[in-house]
Amino acid sequence: MLLNFTKMHGLGNDFMVVDGITQRVRLTTEQIGELSDRHTGVGFDQLLLVEPPRHPDMDFRYRIFNADGSEVENCGNGARCFARFVRDKQLTRKRTLNVETAGGPLTLIVTQNQQVRVDMGSPRFAPDSLPFIADEDALVHTLALPATTAGLTQVDVSVVSMGNPHAVLLVDDVEQAPVEALGPVLESHERFPRRVNVGFMQIKNRSRIDLRVFERGTGETRACGTGACAAVASGIRRGLLDTRTKVRLPGGTLTIEWSGHPDESLFMTGPVATVFEGRIELE
């Protein structure tokens, strides 16, 4: 199978984007894992697949696969790349797109300056929405660690679903946070049956945070859109952040806006870039 693709990134969170509308695409978990290899494949954090919608009120179906081949519900940086991709490939002329994902519908808006604003829907905090094993909803949950990790036996986290599961920790210094040690332990913690993305958030002031994210199935990435949304949503809910907050990630800055009302959508705005076009032969 000869596969055409585009390499894109949103703040350094990089993607292999594949048009499944004008070409026939069948990828196995093993093939995705091989393609993600940065030495022998294309190299990416996630693979994004554009497909025809299954519902008549949607414009496209948006599917996301981690570097290990597992399919996940949502990816905010990927959603921005998706919106630019379908316009650049002339699959649509619309600036406002409604797309279906495994985590629910998304609305994507391409602005006049070619940034993309994404209606991420409402953050959900109920444990069942992630899922997360807990007796009740709470602003903060204490997790016992299976063994002492980075000198810790337990950590406090806020849990948020942005269509995919997130755990957010407050840290004093994001540069010194034990992301490599603590990230994989929390990702596979027994209280997260489907694993979890882990955000390490340092609050600089009420309208600015620094953030690092350990993504499930991938590891730490230079940026995570849903992770930025989850971190700000948890901070607003706890009364620590304003309704419009800048999030500085290793790859760049996103703007997150949310009223704090549980029935209102959260919006994420940021840039995307195309790196190169390619073609690869798959057996």
Image (spheres, rainbow, N blue to C red):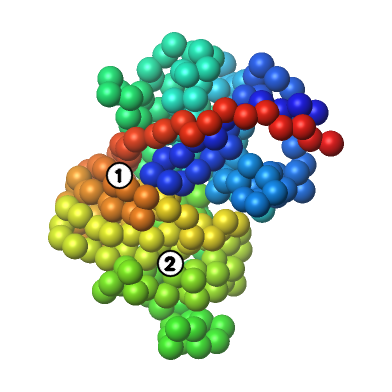
**Pointer 1: what residue?**
254
Spot the residue most to the right. 283
Tag count in the figure?
2
Residue at 32 percent across and 29 percent down: it is 115
**Pointer 2: what residue?**
136
Q: Which mark is nearer the camera, 1 or 2? A: 1
Label 1: few (<14), some (14–19) or many (≥20) C-alpha neighbours in 10 Å: many
Residue nearest the viewer, comparing 38 with 153: 38
Residue nearest the viewer, comparing 12 with 93: 12
Whether residue 146 is situated above or below residue 108 in the rendered picture: below
The reply to whether callout 1 and callout 2 are in contact (CB within 8 Å) is no
Residue at mark 1 to residue at mark 2: CA–CA distance: 31 Å
Question: Hey, what amino acid is under mark 2?
Answer: Glu
User: What secondary structure is marked by label 2?
Assistant: loop
Is 29 positioned to the left or the right of 205 in the image? Answer: right
Expressed as whole percent of the image width and height from the top left, the position of residue 132 reads 52, 63
Quadrant for the C terminus in the image: top right
Whether residue 27 is situated above or below residue 200 in the rendered picture: above
User: What secondary structure is marked by label 1?
Assistant: strand
